[in-house]
Amino acid sequence: MKQIRLFFLALMLFGTGVGLHAQDIHYSLYNMSPLTLNPALTGAFYGSIRVGGIYRDQWFSYSGSDGYVTPSAYIDSPILRGFRDQDWIGVGGMFFQDKAGIGSLRTTASKLSLAYHLGLGKKAKSVLTIGLQGGGVQRRVNVENFLFGNDFQNGEWTNTSSEPIVSSAAPDPDNPDGREIKADYLDFAAGLMLRSNITDESRFEIGFAVNHLTQPNESFRNSGTGGGGNNNVENALRRPMTILAHTRYETALSEKVSFAPTAFFQTTRGATEFAVQAWGGYMLDPTNPTKLNFGLGYRVGDAAQLLLGIDYKDLRVALSYDVTFSQLRNANSYQGGLELAAWYIFKIYKKPDITPTILCPHF
């Protein structure tokens, strides 16, 4: 009960700091952001409560302060026992905010996740998990810095127009000039994952997820289809489903050295992303578990990734840097995205009740 109360208290505090507010995002350190990767990863760890976050700053050298910034945070826990002793239920919550460009296009999501972990076999060396996730999304764009045709006056761009950008029969007191446009909707995702301990030194996982299950209308157009019933227009305004897959294999090569290749794939409306990574690990201090992690990655057709991290007991920290190899390298001088991520796993266990025993030696 202490673990349950602590988890829900943390979840309430977590929820008050953000609005119920998504846009598809991608992280180079995708395995460090489990609840944006796959809802089936909710509660998929050994411990009581996991708290983590990740921050991405992309193309800062190209766009300066008007760049692409994506922070995210989450909390989850394997909080309840399932229908069988080898099953459990994971519960969690996450949010992210994606900010892009001079219009400060902001997509903010806050969602809850639920996962059922089904232990396979008597020793449950393999676990099959199904996860669900849902929550609210807010999209905002400020057109204050946008330039329109009537802003070109006397041969110069002035952006001095006082006309509202968005007309409304019921003006928004928080947005009197109509220069911030809003769109809100609900969004849902589902995921499936299989994890297996192949040997005492190696583990394997593979997962699949589908985002935007209901294909919500995310358009900034308040009039929607204009009442004309045009299915083509209505479908164009809907968020298409995103299908993704991920896999990871980790094995110990010796007492101090480990190796972990990973892969990630996602597709939405014909656009695809595929990334592979190879992580190596070196145990610096086995008696006080400290492991250095390092590696390389590649997002096909886009960027190479430099990877670095460290595990210290129940704390994991990772850093990545993207080196752009696409045509954008001509504009950003090969400088891509920088990411920093961390999580900490709290382990709260009830101390066993031990009856004191007095030993009487025999002489």
Image: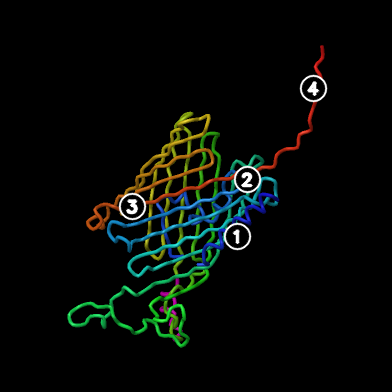
Which residue is depicted at the point 81% across and 19% down? 360
Alpha carbon of mark 1 to alpha carbon of mark 3: how far? Answer: 40 Å
Residue type at tag 3: Val
Mark 3 and mark 2 in contact? Answer it, CB < 8 Å.
Answer: no
343 and 267: which is toward the camera = 343
Mark 1 and mark 3 in contact? Answer it, CB < 8 Å.
Answer: no
Looking at the image, tell me whether mark 1 or mark 4 is earlier in sequence order.
Answer: 1
User: Which numbered disc covers residue 12?
Assistant: 1
Query: What segment is highlighted magenta in the picture?
Result: 228-238
Residue 52 pos. (x, y %): 51, 51
Residue 68 pos. (x, y %): 36, 61
Residue type at tag 2: Leu
Looking at the image, tell me whether mark 3 or mark 2 is earlier in sequence order.
Answer: 2
State whether residue 347 is above or below residue 18.
Answer: above
130 and 292: which is toward the camera = 292
Give left or right: position of 112 versus 295: right
Looking at the image, tell me whether mark 4 or mark 3 is earlier in sequence order.
Answer: 3
Alpha carbon of mark 4 to alpha carbon of mark 3: how far? Answer: 68 Å
The residue where tag 2 is placed is 120
Crowdedness near tag 4: few (<14), some (14–19) or many (≥20) residues, C-alpha within 10 Å: few
* Residue mark closest to the camera, 2 vs 1: 1
Determine which quarter of the picture holds residue 318: top left
Alpha carbon of mark 2 to alpha carbon of mark 1: how far? Answer: 33 Å
Crowdedness near tag 2: few (<14), some (14–19) or many (≥20) residues, C-alpha within 10 Å: some
* Label 1 secondary element: helix
The residue where tag 3 is placed is 300
